[in-house]
Image (cartoon, rainbow, N blue to C red):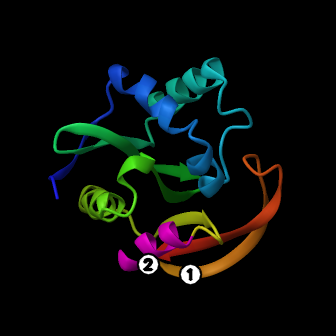
Amino acid sequence: MHEVALRPIEDSDLGTLFEFMRDPESVWMAAFTAEDPDDRDAFDNHMRRVLADPDAKNWAITRGGRFVGSIAAFVLEGDTEITYWIDRDVWGQGVASRALALLLEKVSVRPLRARAASDNVASLSVLRKAGFTIVGTESAYAPARRTEIEETILRLD
């Protein structure tokens, strides 16, 4: 496998990230997405806020030098959570697992939290392989599915 690395997100990544986040299968799996993944203005406004947040740490994920996703740690209601988005073209190739391992080297805050749709088996597997344990579930509205679904909450101490 080509080397997976993290680097700062660049303005030139945003168009590609927008396209990744519009992929229907990816949107369905992520479930907790923008209400309208095709709304570029909403995406740009969201990314502007996210990248300006001093409590958020955002990185681009590259594989062999090619931008293939993003990963971040951010504070929500006093807890530090992580999130990532991987280009569907590289799913199942270890990119998410390696990117998460790299993020865990950079972010020393513990505990860390993560969330995933309970039926997103691949993402739950990535998180558990990195040492996250399931601490609960809750029902939440998933814009991508336009209904409430079960979300699994995980924690890394």
Q: Nearest the camera: 74 or 90?
A: 90
Of residue 64 and residue 41, the one placed in the foreground of this image is 64
How crowded pointer 2 is (Cα within 10 Å; few <14, some 14-19, many 20+) is rated as: some
Which residue is tagged 1?
134
In the displayed structure, 50 sits above or below 114; it is: above
Tell me what residue is drawn at x 82 percent, y 49 percent: 146
| Percent x, y of residue 148 | 83, 60
Residue 87: % across, % down = 42, 45
Magenta stretch, residue numbers: 121-130
**Are the two marked residues, 2 and 1, in contact with CB atoms closer than 8 angstroms?**
yes
| Quadrant, the C terminus | bottom left
In the figure, is residue 105 to the left or right of 86? left
The residue that appears at 65% across and 23% down in the rendered structure is 42
Residue count near mark 1 (Cα–Cα under 10 Å), binned few <14, some 14–19, many ≥20:
some
- Alpha carbon of mark 2 to alpha carbon of mark 1: how far? 8 Å
Given this view, does label 2 or label 1 mark the residue nearer the observer?
2
Q: Earlier in the sequence, mark 2 or mark 1?
A: 2
Residue 91, placed above or below residue 17: below
Residue identifier under label 2:
128
Q: Which element type, helix, strand or loop, lies under badge 2?
A: helix
Is 106 inside the magenta-drawn segment?
no
Instruction: Please state which amino acid type lies under the numbered disc 1.
Output: Ile
- Which SS type dominates the magenta stretch? helix
Residue at x 67% of width, y 23% of height: 39
Q: Position of residue 93 (x, y in %)?
A: 31, 62
